[in-house]
Each structure stands twice: as structure tokens, then as C-alpha cells.
Amino acid sequence: MSQKEYIPAMKFHWLTPIYDPLLKRGMKEAKFKSHLIHQADLRPGQRVLDLACGTGTLTLMIKQAQLEAEIIGLDADPEVLAIAKTKAEQNQLDITFQKGMSLDLPFPEAHLDHIFSSLFFHHLTLEMKRKTLEELLRTLRPGGKINIIDFEKPQNLWMRIAFLPIQLLDGFETTKDHAKGILPQLFRESGFEHVQQTGQFATIFGTLRSYRAQKPE
């Protein structure tokens, strides 16, 4: 798989080593990722996917929150998957990590109970966002839920300015719709129901908004 087919966590592989420290200290990721997990109400025996899991921070937090759930971390970048696997081994957590793309998830229909995604959708073009949501709907069981957090409509002018470095790094084509708050609309258009914004977080790079939505029963 070539780099052209996916975008590394910080667009360039040479920036990967600073990804974890930046999120931990600069964006206080523990706070917004804990919120995302809490809203899901995970149960023993459920099958849970962390889509575009990156270095696995959220994946490990999900497993620690519900040790009796089956947790899968999926990412297209083998470099970050290697980091994620090492983290899981160091913490003695049984997590499956797979290489794969959001546009063609390697799971059968109605296979998953929950799908998480953190800071991923702003890397995708509008067409890719829609195709990814089609795949999420396909692979979730009826009643299954998505739990997504990403950069979205800034809550004020300062947050709009703070978002500009992300747009410069990741590209305006993939991020412009996030500045308008497009995700809830896309969720509904893709067939999800009970779409809710569950949280809002101000960060040094702009406003994050968390969402929950459900596949129809």
C-alpha cells in the first residue's frame, strides 16, 4: 500500500514521532477520548472497531474501559500500527490490529456493535467521507452505534483562527466542510438515525465536536 492511498497521522511520516506528545499535551486527548468512550456504554461481548486507530491510544482506552469486549484497531499506515501493537503488548491488553482502508472495511455485514473514530474524517474528501459512512452502516449490526469526534464548526472567531494550521497541514479540500459543521448532515444522509452532538471541546487547533448516531434497528 503506497502513501498516496492514505494520509499518515500528521500527513508526513517524519512527523509521526510527535503525534502522541502533541495530542497528549497540546490537545488534552485523555479528556475528549474518555468522553467518547463514556457515551458508548460498552458491554461485555460486544465487537468494537477503532477506525483509523493511529498509534492506538483510543484503542487501548476502549479495551481498558471494557476488558470483556472484542476490540479491533484498523489503520492503513503500518508504521503507526506497529506503535499501537507495541503499546498493547506493554499494557498486556488483548487487542487485534489490522491494516485496512475505511473505504473498504475488511468485515462482513452486521459484524460490529460500535465504531469509534477520532480525528479522522477531516482527512477525507467529501466523496470519501460518504463512502466511509456507507461502510460503517454496512458493517454495523442493526442498532449498532458510531461514536465520532473531529474538528467541526468553530465555536468562535478564535477557534476558527486556531483551525487554520490544521487546514494548511491537511489541506483545505478535506477540511473546508468541517469548518461549516458538515458531519451531522452526512450521518443523516447516509442513513443513520438518532444523530446527537454529545460534546464540544476547545483545543489549540480549533473546536472538536463529538457525535453519536445509530444504525436503524
Image (cartoon, rainbow, N blue to C red):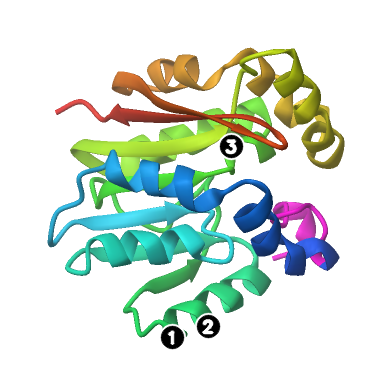
Q: Amino acid at mark 2?
A: Thr
Q: CA distance from mark 1 to mark 2?
A: 5 Å
Residue at the (72%, 30%) spot, across then down: 174
Residue at the (59%, 78%) spot, across then down: 82
Give how far across and how far down residue 78 sits, in percent: 63, 72
Whether tag 1 and tag 2 are in contact, CB under 8 A, the answer is: yes
Q: CA distance from mark 2 to mark 3?
A: 25 Å
Up-down relation of residue 82 to residue 45 (above or below)? below
Q: Name the side, left or right, on which 8 lies relative to 38.
A: right
Up-down relation of residue 51 to residue 183 (above or below)? below
Mark 1 element type: helix
Give the residue at mark 2. Answer: 86
Give how far across and how far down residue 214 sits, in percent: 26, 29
Q: Is residue 11 magenta?
A: yes
Q: Amino acid at mark 3?
A: Phe
Give the residue at mark 1. Answer: 89
Q: Earlier in the sequence, mark 2 or mark 3?
A: 2
Give the residue at mark 3. Answer: 121
Give how far across and how far down residue 210 sits, in percent: 45, 31
In this view, the mark in front (2 or 3): 2
What is the quadrant of the C terminus in the image? top left
Q: Amino acid at mark 1?
A: Glu
Magenta region: 1-13
